Image: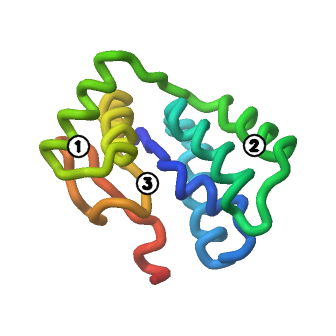
Amino acid sequence: MICFFDTNILLYTVDASDPVRQEAAIACFERAAAEHTVVLSTQVLQEFYNIGTRKLRPPLSPREAQHQVQQLCAFEVIGSSAQSIQAGIDLAQQHRLSWWDALILEAALRAHADVLYTEDGTHGQKFGSLTVVNPFRSTD
């Protein structure tokens, strides 16, 4: 099972301000990593660094965020192209998604992911064989 992780789930793995969600995010990510099924996108890595160093409280130091990104780069990371941007536009319009969420969805679909772990979107929503899963749903 291929698991695509949205930035918000990865940020919770390093955000000690919400220990319940942090524990759930770590467990979810570790399960997928143990099965060698993690896929990320360059967008996720960029957002992780930016948000991690600017919006977390307390923020990660640039050096710590860089280290975290380097570790994440050990997993499969897919980039974007002119075609993927156009496909993202189509998804945003078709499903009334925010631009950034549409790009995440597009990358997950292009990776042939079975699951998209995210806080965004509707838990259980399907896009072909891809299912949106909010790993915090039971902790709300």
Left or right relative to 1: residue 76: right
Label 2 sits on residue: 68
Which residue appears at 20% of the width and 46% of the height?
127
CA–CA distance in space, label 2 to label 1? 29 Å
Residue 115 point in image, percent of width and height: 36, 48
Q: Is residue 89 above or below residue 79?
A: below
Q: Is residue 83 above or below residue 10?
A: above
State the SS at label 1.
helix
Single out the residue that lies furthest toward the left: 94
> Which amino acid does the dot numbered 2 rest on?
Gln
Quadrant assignment, res 60: bottom right
Structural crowding at the residue carrying mark 2, measured as other residues with C-alpha within 10 Å and reported as few (<14), some (14–19) or many (≥20): some
Within 10 angstroms of label 3, few (less than 14), some, or many (20 or more) residues? many
Q: Residue furthest bottom?
A: 140
- Which residue is identified by label 3? 117
Q: Quadrant of residue 108?
A: top left
Identify residue type, mark 1: Ala
> Could you tell which of marks 2 and 1 lies nearer the N-terminus?
2
User: Can you give x and y, in whole percent of width and height, for residue 130 in the image?
Assistant: 27, 45
Q: Which residue is mark 1?
A: 92
Type of amino acid at the residue the image marks with label 3: Tyr
Q: Position of residue 101 (x, y in %)?
A: 36, 48
Q: Secondary structure at mark 2?
A: helix
Q: Mark 2 or mark 3, which has the lower sequence index? A: 2
Tell me the quarter of the image containing the N terminus. Answer: top left
Residue 114 in view here = no
Q: For this rendering, which residue is in front, 85 or 113?
A: 85
Residue farthest to the top, as pictured: 82
Q: Quadrant of the C terminus?
A: bottom left
| Residue 7 horizontal side relative to residue 120, left or right | right
Q: At 54% from the left edge and 47% from the top edge, which residue is drawn?
A: 32
Dot 3 and dot 1 residues touching (CB under 8 Å): no
